[in-house]
Image (cartoon, grey):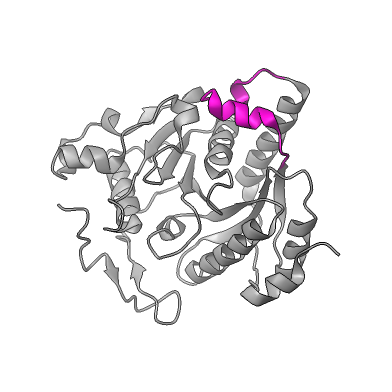
Amino acid sequence: MNISTVPVSEIRRDRRADGEGSVQVSLDPRVSIGNAKVFAIYGKGGIGKSTTSSNLSVAFSKLGKRVLQIGCDPKHDSTFTLTKRLMPTVIDVLETVDFHSEELRVEDFVFEGYNGVMCVEAGGPPAGTGCGGYVVGQTVKLLKEHHLLDETDVVIFDVLGDVVCGGFAAPLQHADRALIVTANDFDSIFAMNRIVQAIGAKSKNYKVRLGGVIANRSDATDQIDKFNAQIGLKTMAQIPSLDVIRQSRLKKATLFEMEETPEVKMVQAEYLQLAARLWAGAEPLECSPMKDRDIFDLLGFD
């Protein structure tokens, strides 16, 4: 099957459209993840979603949970701090067998990372062709066919960039909670507002709800706090701007593998606390996103 040609049944105008005039990627309703708790991580491009996702995956594993992290980016680097290398994507390996998924073995597309976290890179279609939603759908289908979700406690989708179409929003059709990674700056918060809109649209027809905000690379949160108070969001964790985080990426390591200095222990504790809160059940948030022009008026220093 040519991945640049998505079946009409996969993209259609849904009778329960998420928004007026929307054209959505419709995943097979029979292909559900199951009993695992599912979290989808969104945020502005370059904000640190992969670093956040990988450290959160390890935190869940440290709590004794069986964790699967799914990278949803053609760059396929979501899990490299866990596996220490760039893994082949689901689309890569499907292409090698001419998209006959029954010919694949588990070890062709699932790799064990640090502390037992299982890692999958969904990948994506060639630039300018195909649809990210198709890729997500095929990945979950493949995991189900190989019974890899039967004994999984936590699934984390690490989704590229901002939500800009139904394809990139496809993980929201599987997730219980969506988490937004942001920094204490205008551009990140502007992107967060658009993501809140997307999650609200998906929540009309799917179980996904907003779980909260992870403030990343942020020593202060005054702008985030101002925005949260306006629309009803809450910050669940704050990761300061520390050079050791940059160093961990260069070393292809999670923060749980770095030398345990006081600042590293502090960030580890923050991730462990976040994982515990999410496992206990993050309160669903009902938020009212702002108009774009109103964000300009709200944010900024007095």
Q: If the image is split into quadrants, where does the C terminus sit?
A: bottom right
Q: Quadrant of residue 166?
A: bottom left
Question: Where residue 137 sits in the image (x, y, percent)?
Answer: 32, 53
What residue appears at the point 73 percent right and 64 percent down from the top-left corner? 227
Q: Nearer the viewer, residue 68 or 190?
A: 190
| Image x and y of residue 155, in percent | 47, 43
Residue 240 painted magenta: yes
Q: Is residue 200 visible?
A: yes
Judge whether 14 appears above or below 186 on screen. Answer: below
Q: Position of residue 189 (x, y in %)?
A: 65, 60
The residue lying furthest to the top in this view is: 259
Where residue 122 sits in the image (x, y, percent)? 35, 44
In-image side of 58 versus 9 (left or right): right
**Residue reaching furthest to the bottom:** 20
Q: Residue at x 55, y 55 (%)?
A: 178
Q: Which residues are magenta?
A: 239-260
Q: Nearer the viewer, residue 101 or 262?
A: 262
Q: Is residue 112 above or below residue 200?
A: above
Residue shown at 72% from the left, 53% from the top: 184
From what the image shows, is residue 165 above or below residue 247?
below
Q: Is 79 contained in the magenta span?
A: no
How many badges with numbers are in the image?
0
- Which corner quadrant of the image does residue 211 belong to? bottom right
Query: Is any part of residue 145 visible from this angle?
Result: no
Left or right: where 67 falls relative to 221: left
